[in-house]
Image: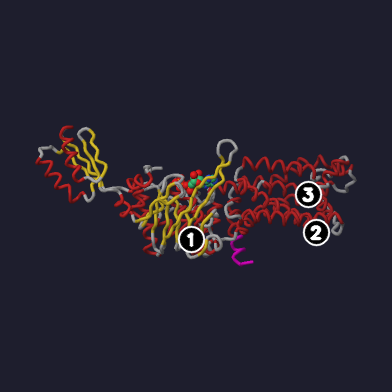
């Protein structure tokens, strides 16, 4: 559905005073998305997610590279590309003074669908996205989350085969977020749609996506399934708290025997990364027992995508960036 | 042109008109503007018209007001576009397969319709004040005004999409509008001024348009003055649409 090669975009920016600096927003990315996939595009603020999406949706000309979307070249067949996709931008799509229902119908009709069809599909989406009763409401009189869901409905009104969602869940409460996840998953189940979405939320990418592309500073630093990415991190984080610092030293020795990385001691606490900890922890507990060490607490944390991100970029991905 | 082009134009036009009509300020100010000019400014001009040897003050005055409505109303049309751009509406429309020209034309048509209604109110009211002249000429005059307004609206939309900032756009518009207003003989014919001012005004296309509309109001269809006005209107119209369409087509506007 999406094939991009060396896609890049530079902006002419301005440095201090009048000197011109070039901002490399996207520095040559290769993207391949198959039909029916849900792919997450994960990266911190300014990583180049929106810029990439705007190039793939024909809103922005790439400065280098090429891309085909839904089988059409974004540079030379933009019209056909637009016909095949839906796009929910990061920053809204409706006039504050318009009426929600009319906005969605006009939008659908610009895709060539009939008025009746646009209205029917629009009302259906309003129902699914918990916007009942807001059909004649002006967006300026809607809450941020309601407006966000209206944006999403706008992008889906013509039942596109390929949907681009730029941070669809920002500003949504946990319940609305979970509801939207179900809705996005249903897009594939019911319509066979392909979904390409950007997000800052690791749990979102984990819960929703078959595959994750991690982008940082305009380059893709990883591309794999959520599980495989998590496996890249050297094991689960095993954290032990024991009776005193003396015991901690002995515990560190024992834990060191099975640890793969990051063995640290902090007072009475000891922690390390252990691969396949499930099979090794039992033995460790027996050994601690035999050594007469009193175990106060034991915690095993599976690696999160946050850990992956830290590993890949050396920076933590803030959850609420 | 593709059949879908007109359909898309109508969708955009209808959306614009619907939102404008729901805004009472837009409707009231639009209608009150021509009335105020006529009521508050007209009486001042009557003695001057006599001085100039005009039979009827309003055949002199109303064409000027028409052009002024066209120029000013339309030149400021772009401000609405900036607000829409900021709300993400433009990008949302540009990601659809709709023709870029249709996105522009639908908007211009709303401005043109506004101008048309204002023009009718103005002319109709002027009759009450004592306007006489060729009705057919007035119809043609109104058409020229509307074409000029379309050109200005297109240019204004193009400028809005390029600058994307009211703060940049306002001074640009003002610095264009003021000399045009003063040098086109909109309120008073340029022939009243000294020679140097007349020479400068010869470079102002809108002067020829105002003069042509004055001729048309008097029923003089086939004079050189009328011809020049028509030519300039068509030139400006084509130029405005060209610039506007080009800007709307640009991939990253
Ligand atoms: N029109 C523009 N002109 C100049 N620089 C730009 C422009 N648009 C984006 N940039 C720069 O390009 C870089 C990437 O921006 P982009 O919007 O793609 O980031 P993002 O990954 O979507 O971030 P966020 O998570 O904040 O939405 C940023 O450094 C940004 O400042
Ligand atoms: Mg973004």
Circle number at residue B136: 2
**Label 2 crowding class (10 Å Cα cut-off): few <14, some 14-19, many 20+?**
some
Residue at left 47%, top 60%?
Answer: A157
User: Could you say which is closer to the camera, residue A151 or residue A268?
Assistant: A268
Q: State the CA–CA distance, disc 2 to disc 1.
A: 51 Å
- Which portion, as a residue range, is magenta? B1-9
The chain containing the residue under callout 1 comes to A
Tag 3 near tag 1, CB within 8 Å: no
Mark 3–mark 1 distance (CA, rounded to whole Å): 45 Å
Question: Mark 3 or 2, which is nearer the eye?
Answer: 3
Q: Which residue is mark 1?
A: A85
The secondary element bearing badge 1 is classed as strand
Q: Quadrant of the N terminus of chain A?
A: bottom left
Residue B5 colored in magenta in the image:
yes
Q: Are marks 3 and 1 on the same chain?
A: no
Q: Secondary structure at mark 2?
A: helix
Which residue in the protein does label 3 denote? Answer: B206
């Amino acid at each position: 559905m999406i094939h991009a090669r060396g896609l890049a975009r530079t902006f002419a920016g301005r440095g201090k005073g009048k000197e011109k600096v070039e901002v490399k927003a996207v520095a040559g990315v290769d993207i391949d998305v198959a039909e029916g996939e849900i792919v997450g595009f994960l990266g911190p603020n300014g990583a180049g997610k929106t810029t990439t999406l705007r190039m793939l949706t024909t809103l922005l000309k790439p400065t280098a590279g090429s891309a085909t979307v839904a089988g059409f070249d974004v540079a030379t067949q933009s019209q056909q590309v637009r016909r095949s996709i839906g796009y929910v931008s990061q920053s809204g799509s409706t006039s504050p003074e318009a009426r929600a229902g009319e906005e969605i119908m006009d939008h659908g009709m610009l895709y060539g669908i009939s008025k009746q069809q646009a209205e029917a599909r629009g009302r259906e989406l309003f129902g699914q996205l918990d916007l009942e009763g807001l059909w004649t409401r002006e967006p300026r009189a809607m809450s941020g989350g309601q407006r966000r869901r209206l944006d999403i409905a706008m992008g889906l009104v013509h039942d596109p085969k390929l949907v681009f969602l730029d941070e669809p869940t920002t500003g949504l409460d946990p319940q609305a977020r979970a509801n939207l996840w179900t809705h996005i998953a249903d897009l594939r189940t019911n319509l066979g749609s392909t979904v390409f979405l950007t997000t800052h939320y690791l749990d979102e990418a984990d819960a929703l996506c078959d595959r994750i592309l991690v982008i940082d500073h305009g380059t893709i630093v990883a591309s794999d399934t959520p599980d495989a990415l998590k496996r890249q991190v050297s094991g689960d984080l095993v954290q032990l708290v024991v009776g005193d610092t003396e015991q901690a030293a002995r515990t560190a020795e024992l834990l060191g025997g099975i640890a793969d990385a990051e063995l640290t001691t902090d007072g009475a606490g000891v922690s390390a990364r252990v691969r396949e900890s499930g099979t090794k922890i039992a033995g460790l507990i027996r050994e601690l027992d035999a050594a007469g060490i009193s175990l106060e607490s034991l915690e095993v944390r599976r690696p999160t995508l946050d850990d992956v991100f830290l590993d890949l970029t050396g920076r933590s991905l803030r959850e609420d960036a | 042109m593709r059949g879908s082009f007109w359909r898309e134009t109508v969708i955009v036009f209808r959306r614009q008109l619907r939102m404008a009509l729901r805004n009472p300020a837009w409707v009231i100010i639009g209608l009150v503007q021509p009335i105020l000019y006529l009521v508050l400014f007209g009486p001042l001009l009557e003695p001057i018209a006599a001085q100039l040897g005009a039979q009827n003050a309003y055949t002199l005055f109303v064409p000027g007001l028409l052009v002024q409505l066209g120029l000013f109303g339309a030149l400021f049309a772009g401000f609405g576009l900036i607000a829409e751009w900021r709300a993400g509406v433009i990008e949302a429309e540009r990601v659809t397969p709709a023709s870029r020209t249709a996105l522009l034309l639908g908007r211009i048509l709303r401005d043109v319709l506004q101008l048309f209604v204002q023009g009718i109110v103005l002319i109709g009211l002027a009759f009450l004040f004592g306007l006489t002249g060729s009705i057919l000429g007035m119809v043609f005059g109104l058409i020229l005004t509307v074409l000029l307004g379309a050109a200005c609206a297109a240019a204004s939309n193009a400028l809005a999409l390029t600058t994307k900032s009211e703060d940049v756009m306002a001074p640009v518009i003002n610095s264009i509008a003021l000399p045009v207003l003063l040098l086109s003989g909109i309120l008073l014919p340029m022939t009243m001024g000294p020679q140097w001012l007349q020479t400068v005004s010869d470079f102002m296309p809108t002067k020829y348009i105002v003069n042509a509309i004055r001729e048309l109001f008097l029923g003089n269809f086939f004079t050189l003055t009328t011809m020049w006005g028509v030519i300039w209107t068509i030139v400006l119209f084509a130029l405005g649409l060209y610039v506007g369409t080009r800007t709307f087509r640009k991939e990253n506007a």
